[in-house]
Image: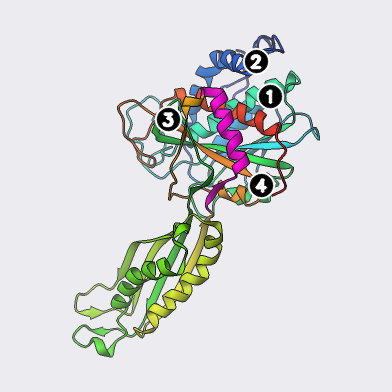
Amino acid sequence: MTTSPTLASGTPMPSWPSAGEAEELSRPLSDPLPELLDRWLAAHGADLVAVRRHIHANPELSGEEHGTAEYLAARLAAAGLTPRFLPKGNGVLCDIGPDNEGQMVALRADLDALPLPDVKDVPYRSTVEGVCHACGHDVHATVVLGAGLVLANLAEQGRLPGRVRLVFQPSEERFPSGAPEVIEAGGLEGVSAIFALHCDPRLPAGLVGVRSGPLTAAADQLEVRLTGRGGHTARPHLTADVVHALGRVVVDLPALLSRRVDPRAGLSVVFGAIHAGQAPNAIPQEGIARGTVRVLDRTAWREVPELVTQLVDDVVAATGAQAEVAYTRGVPPVVNDRMATAILAGAAAAALGRDHVVETPISMGGEDFAWYQEHVPGAMARLGVGRPGEALDLHQGGFDVDERAIGYGVRVMVHTALGALDTSFPSH
């Protein structure tokens, strides 16, 4: 493999593939896709692992993914593609295939890491104190990069029946998230459908979990601030007891919502922080409760802010306190389009075998992939990355993956892109 100039950070940037490798990969044009993928991954599987380890060792928090974006853009440019940065420079879009020929589908990856210490004892351990890729975004980016390079090779052979856009997105892990930035920058212009994989350590490498309909919940944040006349705990009748009122809100709000929202919507309100007062014998003048609102149904998600505010006011009214509700939109629920899910499931079966495709359960976690689904049909699947003998979960400092999952993910994403390009999607 030849070597081109280094990045600004000093990291070598190998060209990928070299002219000789491209010639080998292009023979013969009639090779079935599985055989072509076998040869490509045999030649470049180790490179993909190195890419993942580089990203893992150099994590960047939400909104700060400039180095990761530069690294990926350089890899794409070295393969003869034309990546373009998002306006803030911390994300990348890259189109593959001839302009204005056929429909376009998108493959999405996220780039940001979490503010957690990396406690693993591995050569690619995070070099940034207190920051690590504990959710698998390093794998997501590597898989989409690898799939893009294979698809670029197919385009050179005239075997790509349309266009594919690679979306490397910042800021998935925080509110407000990065998907709306991508959309505002034109990331979905001309796109008929969008697809993504998300690491799942509960599944062993080699399995893919799919599900049509709700996959993850909407995730919003709620803050209830109560104020009232404080005073001595010996004379609560002379006060507006905000501590008592906060207790009412924390207990009564979830209960009342369960009777005002269809239970099939999967609504969950959980408070994670309550603060009020200091002294045990003094009723404070202010108290705050903060929590999350999660729901699986899109219609309920759109209606719940107004309903929550109304119910909080109703609960607090009888206590004499005053309520101020701050409801912050996070992400909508991921609701997988039926046709897009069928394509993704069929692609996974073609890539890995039908017995390697399983149904994945609904998660109450949030995922900002949902913002794309507000505009175009889309589907997300779970990529098995579980390591034998380990039971680690996402968002843990010791989280790691079975790196064989990278090759499996590349196969699935290439098959998905080709299957989607052969499908006519209705307007969303």
Dot 1: within a 10 Å radius of its alpha carbon, few (fewer than 14), some, or many (20 or more) residues? many
Q: Earlier in the sequence, mark 1 or mark 2?
A: 2
Question: Does residue 17 appear left or right of residue 399 in this picture?
Answer: right
Residue drawn at point x = 43 percent, y = 78 percent = 313
Question: Does residue 5 appear left or right of residue 232 in this picture?
Answer: right
Q: Earlier in the sequence, mark 2 or mark 4?
A: 2
Estimate the x, y position of residue 376 in percent, counting from the top left.
66, 47
Mark 1 residue type: Ala
SS class, disc 2: loop
Residue 124 seen in render: yes
SS class, disc 1: helix
Dot 2: within a 10 Å radius of its alpha carbon, few (fewer than 14), some, or many (20 or more) residues? few
* Discs 2/3, front: 2
Estimate the x, y position of residue 149 in percent, counting from the top left.
63, 24
Q: Which residue is mark 1?
A: 152
Report the disc number at residue 376: 4
Q: Earlier in the sequence, mark 2 or mark 3?
A: 2
Whole-angstrom CA distance, mark 1 to mark 2, is: 16 Å
Q: Which residue is mark 2?
A: 32
Q: Which residues are magenta?
A: 333-353
Mark 4 residue type: Val
Colour scheme employed for the rendering of this structure: rainbow
SS class, disc 3: strand
Dot 3: within a 10 Å radius of its alpha carbon, few (fewer than 14), some, or many (20 or more) residues? many
* Discs 4/1, front: 4
